[in-house]
Amino acid sequence: MVKLVAAAGLAALFVPFALMLSLAATVSPTTACQSWSTQHGWQDTSGIAAPKAVQRPSHSQASADHQAPAQKSPRPLTLVGGSGSPDLDALAQAATVSGGGDDRPSPSEGECAESHGSPIGGMTCPPTGSPAEKGLTPDALLVLRCVEQQFGQHIYAGVGERASNPGSDHPAGRAVDVLINDYTSTTGIAEGARIAEWVRAHAAQLGVKYVIWSARIWNAGDAGWSTYSHPAGASDDNSLHFNHVHVSVHGHRGTGFPANGAVVYPVPAGLADSNQDNWGETSGIRSGWHTGTDFSVACGTPVLASHAGTVEIDTAQSWAGPHLVKVSLGPGRLTTWYAHMQSLTVSSGDIVTPGQQIGEVGNLGNVSGPTGCHLHFEVHLHGGSIYGPDNVDPTPWLAANVGKAPDPGDARIATFNALGHSHTRPGGNRPGWADARERMKGTVEKLSAEAIDILALQEFEPYQEKAFDDFTAGAWATFPRSGGTAGNANVVAWRTDRWQLVRAERIAIPYFDGNPVRMPYVLLRSTSTGQQVWVGSFHNPADVRGPAEGHRIEAERRQARLANALSSAGTPVVFAGDMNERSDYYCRTTAASTLRAANGGTPDPCLPPPKMEIDWIMGSPRVSFSGYRADQSVRGSLSDHALISVSITLN
């Protein structure tokens, strides 16, 4: 017998435990694999609380903040003959063996695959058409699509506002909520348990970090479930995940998402020599330089995805024809572009494998020649804009990567002396410059255009910090915070959807007159790959207050010693900043440490890079650099320094 009673404004469910296991076990393969909108009224959401306040701190805090095995759930399901939350391990186990009145087992992977026409074993599940797919990382897409394929139609919550919990995985597209219809019934409980346990069983393929369901949490690597407590102490059904299964993912780690497939040519291999190798050329039919390379082949030739990824179709680029196809490994990661196609075989949101046909060569858009038939192919290492610094020559990229897993790089990092507000405010020593707030607005726009996701800032004063916070709207974090007072003008900033702070430190560096200033270095972890890197932001003293070379030498010595200590543990290190030296800085630093410059040079004998600024980006041996750029366009408008940027790969 099942009856609902009110208790402190919440529904308390009394269910004989044996009956709960039996009902979970008797859900048939057909029911589990059919559309639940037909079987159980999923279109009627009036009884489902929208998950507006699902909150979760970062994964590194999951165990510490939420696991309390000896503590009862704040909203237990009271069972006849016992108390406490349902045993999800036992419930899920019961759901995979025969039981109930008809001895039917739960649906196997093969049965669901057959009924939906796509194998689960390879974890390549078709798009659902759900608006919740928009903005999800590949791992989160896999979770949503494969749950849909395995268990039928559901309502999902993906990327959404979590203003009260900026640490949530939802805004970054690394979480999916699967809403459970009639979640207080034994059928609803069994359905939620099935989904939660199935996701747990396929965590490696799906790239799952943790799962929360029915006041229980499972972290990847744990043997079983533990009690979940809401971080703010909330005890409603939504906050304790009774009405939905919450799944957080890494982003790009699932083995089912073919991110590690070998790169292929974008046309059949036998036609690879049709490559015109014309990246960077200029002509009268273009407004700028040629941003890709052209494969001159007949119209109708298959166009192939050069690597695995998610498809985006851009219909606003008339030069490319009615549709510019982009295949991406995710935000800020490797993205290839395909233009002038006469037809497509994919849609936005599709996940493709290397060599999969995505369309046919055409002659649409800005083309020339007798027939105009060709494929325009571009490579953007970090998903940047058409003329962005991450746009690299496709010909050597293909030569280096065909037959191998792509090396997209792990981040685009920059260093920028922002020219402090104290210089340009009324009465400052730089009259005529724009206000620092306006300059910071332009800086943020530049960071977006250049696809920067880690930034070392110098002369970053409290007024500029406030402007940066306003214009980035929570998309970036910085260390250290000024607290509204001067003194923390050196800062490391990072995009929170791509990087997570692990540790933050400061070191005393001699500045003007040798007075020590505590400058930051932080350990960041990639939200998509889990890779970690130390990043430091430094500003060594100039001679504006008298000779400061001795203080610069001591600053360099301390920075070199710190870099050696940090890299000795095997973690990549990147130090950046305004060093106020050129060749002397390079020679002294490379002699005293394992740091090497992003713009080249030879340490022994010391041969500095041919082009140098006083702003540097240096990396330890486990850091590879590509696409170095000193952007002079900002000099005189945003700052008196160039914006220095480079792509890094962490080894």
Image (cartoon, rainbow, N blue to C red):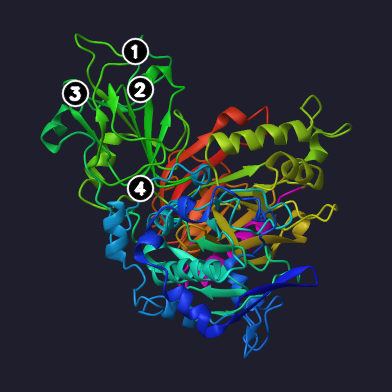
Secondary structure at badge 3 equals loop
Give how far across and how far down residue 469 sits, in percent.
73, 45
Q: Nearer the viewer, residue 159 or 193?
A: 193
504 left or right, relative to 280: right
Q: Which mark is on residue 290?
A: 2
Query: Residue 298: which quarter of the image?
Result: top left
**Marks 3 and 1, how far apart in space?**
26 Å
Asked whether the viewer can see residue 20, the reply is yes
**Marks 2 and 1, how far apart in space?**
8 Å
Q: Which amino acid type corresponds to the residue marked 3 in the rendered image?
A: Gly
| Residue located 36% across and 75% down the image | 102
Q: Earlier in the sequence, mark 2 or mark 1?
A: 1
Which is more foreground, mark 2 or mark 4?
4
Query: What secondary structure is the magenta-colored segment mainly?
Result: helix
**Residue wearing tag 4:** 126
Secondary structure at badge 2 equals loop
**Residue wearing tag 1:** 283
Q: Quadrant of the N terminus?
A: bottom right
**Marks 4 and 1, how far apart in space?**
42 Å
**Residue wearing tag 3:** 300
User: Does residue 567 belong to the magenta stretch?
Assistant: yes
Which is more foreground, mark 3 or mark 2?
3
Q: Nearer the viewer, residue 591 or 572?
A: 572
